[in-house]
Amino acid sequence: MRFSQLVAATALALAFAGAPLQAREANDALTVPPSGVLGVGEAQLTPAFWIGLQAEPDRVILDRAAIEAQNAKLLRLDPSMHDLRALPKSLDRAQVAGWIEALSQRPERPLFDVDGRPVPAATLDAVVGNLALAAIPAQQKTRYGLVVRRAALRTFPTTLRVFSEKGDTDIDRFQETAEFPGTPVAIVHASADGQWLFVVSPRYAAWIDKNDVAEGSAAEVFGYADKTPYRVITGATERTVFTREQPAVSQLQLDMGTRVPLQTGLPPDQPVNGQTPYAAHVLELPLRKADGTLGFSPALLQKNTDTADGYLPLTRANIIRQAFKFLGERYGWGHAYDGRDCSGFVSDVYRSMGVQMPRNTSRQAISPALEHRTFTDKDSHEARLKAAQALEVGDLVYIPGHVMMVIGHWHGQPYVIHDAGGMSYRKADGGKARIKLNSVSVTPLLPMLYNDRQSYVDRMTSIVRIRH
């Protein structure tokens, strides 16, 4: 899904011994700046540097029609995706239980709370009991809703944060992902305590706080998703204008790639939520009424925010610009900390250009709908290195549990931007320097070591290229 071992899977090192001459010469050209991040100076932290290296940075890679065809293919062929519009009018128990049981399996390994104390078996028993599997009816009407705010999707119906190791308070093993305002979902089950809903979104199936979803008819939900005109959030994150009159849509976080319809039926000379709308876009946002049903409200988004009247063209320049808008954002496992993880990062960047992707690295790397080259133990280091040297801007490089986005070549080797936990590399004296990144970072690819014996190139499982 993301980093299976956050620091171990993000080790970065110089590979001198046994490396091909070309790789050693490339490493020799890399310097270690005060930050300790190998081969990356201030210039390499700007999108302009990488865009300037491209021969045709503004050439369109896929036009809108091709992207729509690609998205339709993804929805049709990829088993991790869910075509909500194709769901039957009623769902049987086997289908619903299958979704829940595929995700919410009782943990077998020891877990720890935020204070490093072991999570008692009784606590886990209560969490599992809250699934209420016995309460799933033999048949139920298919229900729909819209997510009303940026919301966590959880493994179990609980806010309990659990960790694999004492002292680790970043990777919450019950955190799966997050969904953004306006995301359509199918509502298929409720927890025993009534506080959580199991929902199926286009890219995930998990538990969500019931207050983050408003239930409506299929016509309302999909009508909202299809509504035009709309704005697309092209900044890393933007927020609606503060409003005391309608707290549900006040300072609401909207993340990159979120599509939000415009409210076009209001008089332009009349206040919206107590404020003139002339310097803002008037959005139409979903909200949850007191009875849990779906309603809508206008909300203002300043015109000087980073948005567009449609998805951005898919070009190398836009891939680089969009990726760099997250540079320095803290790593957030499962979209925690109002941020994102490695697979969430690359999918949010591509979503701003209208390209949909599976949520997790394991699914992205092998999706039957995406052009990918896979690697096995039979692929030699030389063959892998040749593939790495042929990488292009926007290509996605996968190793177990992690994904990186290529931003160009410099000093004879590819560079990547990725949501990385840490890095290490060989110093001149043979020792190993260790740097904790824990953020969206720029690094070279070839020097990266997965462990003391293997480089990232040696552990590549797949390269995905978004092209015709």
Image: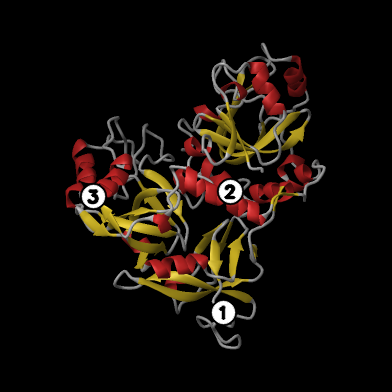
From the viewer's perspective, is 41 left or right of 296? Answer: right
Percent position of residue 341, x then y: 51, 43
Distance between mark 3 and mark 1 Cα atoms: 42 Å
What is the quadrant of residue 313 in the picture? bottom right
For the C terminus, give its image quadrant: top right
The numbered mark at residue 467 is none
> Camera-side residue: 317 or 60?
60
User: Which circle's residue, 2 or 1, is located before the other in the chain?
Assistant: 2
- Residue at 47 percent of width and 62 percent of height: 181
Q: Dots 3 and 2: beta carbons under 8 Å? A: no
Q: Secondary structure at mark 1?
A: loop
Q: Quadrant of residue 208?
A: bottom left
* Residue 263 falls left or right of residue 467: left
Residue 13: x and y, percent? Answer: 63, 23
Taking the spot 21% from the left edge, 47% from the top edge, the residue there is 133
Q: Earlier in the sequence, mark 3 or mark 1?
A: 3
Identify the colour scheme used.
Answer: secondary structure
* Left or right of 45, for residue 206: left
**Residue indicated by mark 2:** 70
Q: Which mark is residue 264?
A: 1
Residue type at tag 1: Thr
x, y percent for residue 449: 59, 23
Q: CA distance from mark 2 to mark 1?
A: 30 Å
For numbered disc 2, what is the local secondary structure?
A: helix
Q: Amino acid at mark 2?
A: Gln
Front: mark 3 or 1: 3
- Where is residue 396 shown, x and y percent of the image? 61, 37
Q: For residue 93, which numbered disc appears in the image?
A: 3
Task: Please tell me which of labels 3 and 2 falls first in the chain.
Answer: 2
Query: 313 or 435: which is nearer to us?
Result: 313
